[in-house]
Amino acid sequence: FLASGSVPGRGPYAKQVERALDFILANQDAQGFIAAHETRMYSHAFATMFLAEIYGTSRDDRVRKALQRAVEFTYKSQNKEGGWRYVPNADESDMSITVCQVVALRAAKNKGIYVPKESIDAAVDYVLRSAVTADGWGRGFERGAFLYQYKSNNTAAEAMTRTSFALTAAGLTTL
């Protein structure tokens, strides 16, 4: 709907976009987390991206405030590894959720919302540590690929992780 040029108050899908915005705003908690029906951090990231796009076209103050709360929730829920997982503040991270959060943060930053450099730097460090940099690393993953999960000093994570074209694309998108 947004790609077609529809925004609240304008375009062939204006009413649908307005209803979606109302739904997102109604499902943001006081801390900034956007979730409905027990959704997780993926949903939060996509809802944050949606708010960034709406704010960029409307400059609506209520959207800006919701977007800022969503961004603050995102960077405050980043873990010590520098990434994110299904739930806020999880001890472990994964590439697919991390890329969603970073892209959402970038979308908000592009619209003038403050995003701490330290949060982005920590995410980049996590992604770089997730890169397979030598042939024969771990279980023989192909050099240049990115791991689904990386956790320092954790051989169990190494044994359970994987690489794929999509995860590598996610790593490169994050960088």
Image: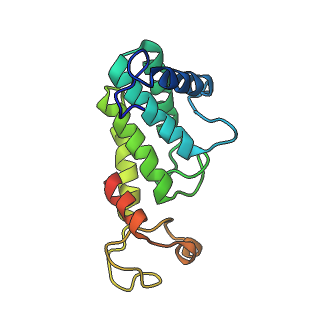
Q: Nearer the viewer, residue 70 or 18?
A: 18
* Res. 82 in view: no
Whole-percent x and y of residue 12? 41, 23
Q: Disc count in the image?
A: 0
As drawn, 74 above or below 53: below
For residue 156, what is the image quadrant?
A: bottom right
Residue in view at x 46 percent, y 52 percent? 98
Q: Nearer the viewer, residue 23 or 154?
A: 23
**Farthest right residue in view:** 37
* Res. 24 in view: yes
Whole-percent x and y of residue 80? 50, 51
Whole-percent x and y of residue 8? 44, 18
Q: Split into 4 quadrants, where in the image is the C terminus?
A: bottom left
Whole-percent x and y of residue 115? 37, 34
Q: Split into 4 quadrants, where in the image is the N terminus?
A: top left
As drawn, 36 above or below 143: above
**Farthest front residue in view:** 12
Q: Is residue 141 left or right of residue 173?
A: right
| Colour convention | rainbow
Q: Is residue 157 left or right of residue 144?
A: right
Residue in view at x 49 percent, y 41 percent? 45
Q: Is residue 61 left or right of residue 26?
A: left
Q: Is residue 54 left or right of residue 19?
A: left
Q: Nearer the viewer, residue 134 or 96?
A: 96
Residue in view at x 43 percent, y 36 percent? 49
For residue 106, what is the image quadrant?
A: top left
For residue 101, what is the image quadrant?
A: top left
As drawn, 84 above or below 26: below
Residue in view at x 56 percent, y 58 percent? 92
